[in-house]
Image (cartoon, coloured by chain):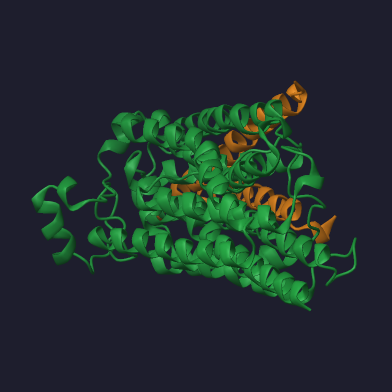
Chain colours: A orange, B green
Amino acid sequence: MHVDWAALAIVAVVSIMTSVIFTILLASGIRLVSAAKIKSNEGGSGIATVSLGYLSLSIAALIVLFGIYLIVPQFH
Amino acid sequence: MGTDVTELFIVTTVIAVALIFDYTNGFHDSANAMAGPIATGALRPRTAVILGAVLNLLGACLSTAVAKTISGGFFDDELITASIILAGLVGAIVWNLMTWLFGLPSSSSHALFGGLIGAVIVGAGIASVHGWVIVSKVLLPAVVAPLVAGIAAAWATRLAYRITRRTPSVHTDTGFKHGQAFTASMVALAHGTSDGQKTMGVITLVLIAANLQAAGTGPQLWVIIISALAIGLGTYSGGWRIMRAMGKGIVEIETPQGAASGAATSATILASAHFGFGLSTTHVCTGSILGSGVGRGAEVRWSVARRMVFAWLLTLPGAALVGGLAALLADQGVCGISVLLVLLAGTCLAIYSLSRRHRITHANVTDSHEVLVLAAAAPPTYAGEALLEAPNKPKKVKKPKLKSAA
């Protein structure tokens, strides 16, 4: 019986890591942008926080774009 | 002359039945991408299925490099004939409709392989089926897919709640819903590219076998278009019974949880497609919804999950049984095939009319978590409610639980 255990292990590790990293980026982005909004409502400046938040969301968006790149066969 | 007409009849029949299979494939798997966003309200039910349909159609048109074989290694390619393909498709369609009736998400690919295997057993004996391939391509992945996707979703969900513990839910809601809509769209597109090909492959194979197309050529434009349309229409029709079972039946899905399970589903599907360890989209998706429920510490309906796993295990033998019986008829020439078509139409109608007893539509998909089949099984209140509350909007997910779970 032939089972490609190496492929299985890679799939497991990559799936889990990507899900976790994507979720961390998305959740952190949401948290930082929200914190910045609250800060500016209170009269403070949330520039640093908001840029960090959008940076985090942009990296999450890049992961989505990479996913689309993988799906569409014409791209590779 | 006579043989030409017979052959043309068989070819047309296979194409028609293949398109019906493609349609059931679409509505059976519509929930894989869209059950989550519909359950959390990230997308309205109608919007979700339209988006899913368009992306499936697009995906099917993008990926037309069909596999040379449809045997999947389960048996030798020489055994494949038009009547075996026909019987296999009938087995897969009937199994897809039965599982849809009971709201059980099962793999359409397994149903198709099951139907073909049953037909091959009838035609060439059980020895012609490679048993170990069934273990390595069906049984093992059915265990691995929900485990991997479940672990990924559980961790992602836990982190999502931990990170946004102190963030007001007004802000997290929109953000996570957007994230969920994106990941769901990826799943729908990926589904189109992988499953759209199956029907194109079947039709192309039959056309080549009948000498209507040169060997070694890809699918013709009209084949691509009708296959893509069939899977798109199927997705659009929603398969609301499975949508409810996945979105509401296993566990109540909250917004951050939905985003995390969506991320796990798309990551696992893409990784499995890319690194060559094929996993069923349906199994992956069920696994991540389950895992996200565990990760949030929510009450998972294990009885529902158990029933789904039984359905997965039964899919191959179940479809094989129907496919085998269908093969007995399909081998009897034009008469047998005509009887088979009448029986298929009758079965489809019977299942459809059974489903009408407790209809689930885009309007009431999120109202309850139960998929009822027979009137006797219905608690009296629900039957009444379903009629009265039909036009309700999807319910908002309750928030208070969120904090205690994190």
Position of the C terminus of chain B, as image quadrant, is top left
Residue B305 visible in the snapshot: yes
Residue B107 visible in the snapshot: no
Q: Percent from the top left, x then y, of residue B253? A: 36, 44
Quadrant hosting residue B395: bottom left
Position of the N terminus of chain B, as image quadrant, is bottom right
In screen coordinates, is B179 left or right of B367?
right
Q: Percent from the top left, x then y, of residue A36? A: 47, 49
Q: Percent from the top left, x then y, of residue B200? A: 72, 63
In screen coordinates, is B40 left or right of B176?
left
Q: Is residue B174 above or below residue B234?
A: above
Residue at the spot 68% in from the left edge and 48% down from the top edge: A63
Residue ranking furthest to the left: B380
In screen coordinates, is B360 left or right of A68?
left
Q: Is residue B155 above or below residue B47?
A: above
Residue at the spot 79% in from the left edge and 52% down from the top edge: B67
Quadrant hosting residue B403: top left
In screen coordinates, is B283 left or right of B210?
left
